[in-house]
Image (cartoon, rainbow, N blue to C red):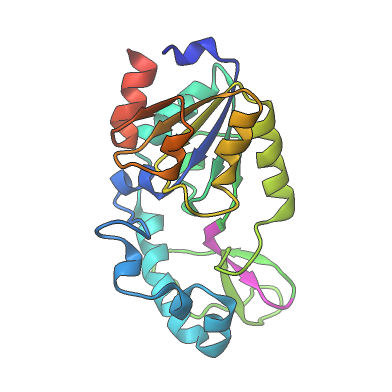
Amino acid sequence: MNVYSFKDIAVLTGAGISTESSIASFRGQNGLWKNYRPEELATPQAFAKNPELVWEWYALRINTVLKAKPNKAHYLLADLEKTRKLTIASQNVDQLHQRAGSKNVLELHGNISHSRCLQCANLDKLKIDFKHPPKCSKCNENTRPNVVWFGESLPQNTFQKAIQAFQNCDLAMVIGTSGVVEPAASLANLAKSKGAFVLEINPELTPISQIANLSIRDIASTGLDNLINN
């Protein structure tokens, strides 16, 4: 297929696109949940019970993310955006798409590089090896990681923009996501119902594979490179 024959592209990306940047996924053989239970670290209840423990775990992940660099897959999507209308709805919180040069990125699950004040909602950018738990720079109140936890809703305005992008696209690309985390996983089905061509890039079989017009069994960088440059 020729990706350049499509005019309006919507892309859903998951942890698989960032594993080549040495950021572990939550699932899979080496996933972060192999050593921790999600309800112990990534829920509002866990944070209320033991904020120090949650911040300690997140500090390790934040340091990893801040040191990471975009990989070829991120750069390929950024380059494609220069010639096509392209919207990325990302389940990742690492900002690697933006650091690679992508402009139209919707962060469905937040942004791990910032803390969010529990009192005034102020966002503070975090630095490598930051002191934790961090306090708000404006009101000195407690903060939390600026991510969407299990049991929380996605940011409504952001997800609405993602819905619009997948409703209007003629090509929906699903890259490196397990296809099981809702409501993001439903975006591919939405695009399919509106007549879009659904393309999946993932080395493993996923629920998206059942509806995809084409599934490429490869890692993100190689799959995208072969798709775009061949």
* Residue 115 among magenta residues: yes
Quarter of the image for residue 222 reads top left
User: What secondary structure is the stretch in magenta mostly built from?
Assistant: strand
Tell me the residue at 61%/35% (across/down).
Answer: 104
Where is residue 230 drawn, in percent x and y? 32, 12
User: Residue at image x 34%, y 41%?
Assistant: 205
In the drawing, does residue 170 fall left or right of residue 13?
A: right
Where is residue 189 shown, x and y percent of the image? Answer: 58, 37
Q: In this figure, what is the number of numbered marks? A: 0
Horizontal arrangement in the rendering, residue 72 relative to residue 101 (left or right): left
Quarter of the image where one finds residue 171: top right
- Residue 197 location (% of width, % of height): 53, 22
Q: Which residues are magenta?
A: 111-119
Furthest toward the bottom, the residue is 49
Work out whether 132 lies above or below 167.
below
Q: Whole-percent x and y of residue 217?
A: 30, 33
Q: Quadrant of residue 82?
A: top right
User: Residue visible at 73% across and 78% down?
Assistant: 119
Which corner quadrant holds the N terminus? top left
Q: Check residue 34 for magenta coloring.
A: no
The one of 218 and 192 positioned closer to us in this rendering? 192
Depth order, front residue of 78/13: 13
The residue most toward the front is 210
From this view, report whether residue 22 is shown above or below residue 115. Answer: above
Residue appearing at x 64%, y 73% in the figure: 137
**Viewer-nearest residue: 64 or 45:** 45
